[in-house]
Amino acid sequence: MNREELKTYIPHREPMLLVDEAEVGADGVCRATYRIREDEFFCQGHFPGDPIVPGVILCEIMAQCCALLVKDDLIGKQTLYSGMNNVKFKHIVRPGDLCEVKARLINRRGPLVCCQAELTVDGKLCSKGDLSFALIAK
């Protein structure tokens, strides 16, 4: 899916749409990419002259990928994140980096969805964690 196709499923729009392309494979893993742009609002003040992507943005990139695991259930619903556990930040991500995310469904009970995700740049693990969210009717 490209950015326009993604908008069918997830409600995020620029500047908070943080997935460029995504695909859910037959193995049940969502693989997504996002290129950090030079003019991202979150890099302008974090930190001037030495921009670093904030950890919370890395979590949001992973979260949007996780939501796509249940993409057919997203239409007419909103994802509200209920938890982030075991989140680790291993390497700095900067403008120009291509983030590659892999996410897989761990558990689902009714509207609650639990996933594991990892974000890499050039094969280096930059962030990982267990993310959970609820699907809430709009």
Image (spheres, rainbow, N blue to C red):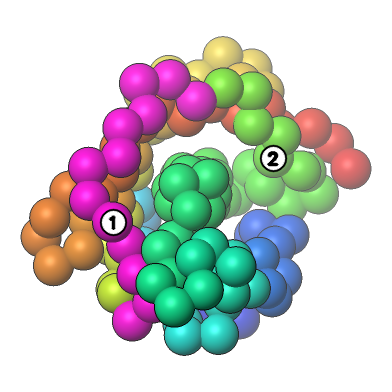
Q: What SS does tag 2 mark?
A: strand
Position above or below: 34 against 63: below
Q: Amino acid at mark 1?
A: Ile
Q: Is residue 65 visible?
A: no
* Number of disc labels: 2
Question: Callout 1 environment at 10 Å: few (<14), some (14 to 19), or many (20+)?
Answer: some
Q: Which amino acid, mark 2?
A: Thr
Judging depth in this view, the residue of 91 and 46 nearest the camera is: 46
Residue drawn at x 59%, y 49% as measured from the top left = 72
Q: Which residue occupies the extreme top position in the image? A: 109
Residue ID for mark 1: 92
- The picture places residue 28, in percent across and down from the top left corner, at 30, 43
Q: Nearer the viewer, mark 1 or mark 2?
A: 1
Picture residue at 69% right of the left edge, 75% below the top:
14
Residue at horizontal 39%, vertical 72%? 50
From the viewer's perspective, tell me whether residue 28 is left or right of residue 114: left
Tell which residue pokes out farthest to the left in this image: 123
**Which residue is disc 2 drawn over?**
79
| Element at label 1 | loop
Residue 16's label in the rendered image is none
Q: Which residues are magenta?
A: 84-96
56 left or right of 119 in image: right
